[in-house]
Amino acid sequence: MLRLNLMPWRERQRLATLRRLRLMVVGAAVMALCAVLLMDQLARQRFRQQAIANNGQQAAIDALEAQMTEHDRIRQSYNAVRAQSAALADLRNEQGLVTAVFADMERALPEGVQLLKLELEGSRLHMVGVAASGAVVAQLMRELERSGVMRDLELKSLRSRPGGDEFLLLARLSAYWS
């Protein structure tokens, strides 16, 4: 019988298998490196796109904030104009107020009273005048209270002078008039 030595053939077979394994390991390593580089490139590209999107959104936000600032400035101007308009309307409504107060005071003044000075401080009215007698001053006070123009009338001083009695009368204008 013939004996064959298969050792060299087996050795070549083993070396070929080892070479294929090495090639597969190197190929897998190259493929893994390529995959990592590709993933890195995709991640960097995604990061750049996100940065561009963020910059665009930030620019839009800045534009909106500028518009909001302008809107707030316009709103403040509008509120100031409305306040001025309301103040003018109040002045127009109270335009006849002073004449009405003077008309009521004129109706309340009895014969023999002469007012020399009127001062208004807030809602307090100081009246200085001369009356024929103290009774006329009392009548003036009653008539002023009855007219509804003044409240909390207070006679501060009453002095006798050669031309009549000089008086200082303090009053608070009623809420209707102030």
Image (spheres, grey):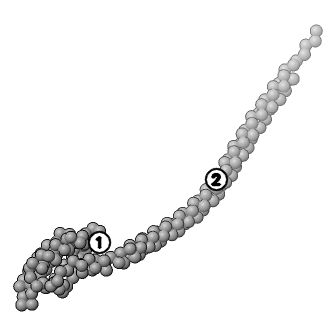
Asked if residue 37 shows in the view, the reply is no
Note whether 88 is above or below 7 in the view shown: below
Question: Which of the marked residues, 2 or 1, is nearer the chain's N terminus?
Answer: 2
Residue drawn at x 17%, y 86% as measured from the top left: 114
- Mark 2, mark 1: which one is toward the viewer? 1
User: Tag 1, which secondary structure?
Assistant: loop
Front position in the image: 163 or 43: 163
Residue drawn at x 75%, y 40% as measured from the top left: 31
Residue 122 location in percent, x, y? 25, 74
Note whether 29 is above or below 120 in the view shown: above
Residue 138 location in percent, x, y? 12, 75
Q: What residue sits right under mark 1 in the picture? A: 177
Residue 55 location in percent, x, y? 61, 59
Residue 173 picture quarter: bottom left
Front position in the image: 116 or 110: 110
Residue drawn at x 24%, y 70% as measured from the top left: 148
In this view, the residue farthest toward the front is: 111
Residue 54 picture quarter: bottom right
Report whether 27 appears left or right of 116: right
Q: Quadrant of the N terminus?
A: top right
* Residue type at the position of mark 2: Gln
Residue drawn at x 12%, y 84% as measured from the top left: 131
Front position in the image: 137 or 48: 137
Mark 2 surroundings within 10 Å by alpha-carbon count, few (fewer than 14), some (14 through 19), many (20 or more): few
Note whether 74 is above or below 8 in the view shown: below
User: Tag 2, which secondary structure?
Assistant: helix
**What mark, if any, has residue 50 been given in the picture?**
2
Mark 1 surroundings within 10 Å by alpha-carbon count, few (fewer than 14), some (14 through 19), many (20 or more): some
Report whether 80 appears left or right of 105: right
Residue 50 location in percent, x, y? 64, 53
Report whether 12 appears left or right of 86: right
* Residue type at the position of mark 1: Trp
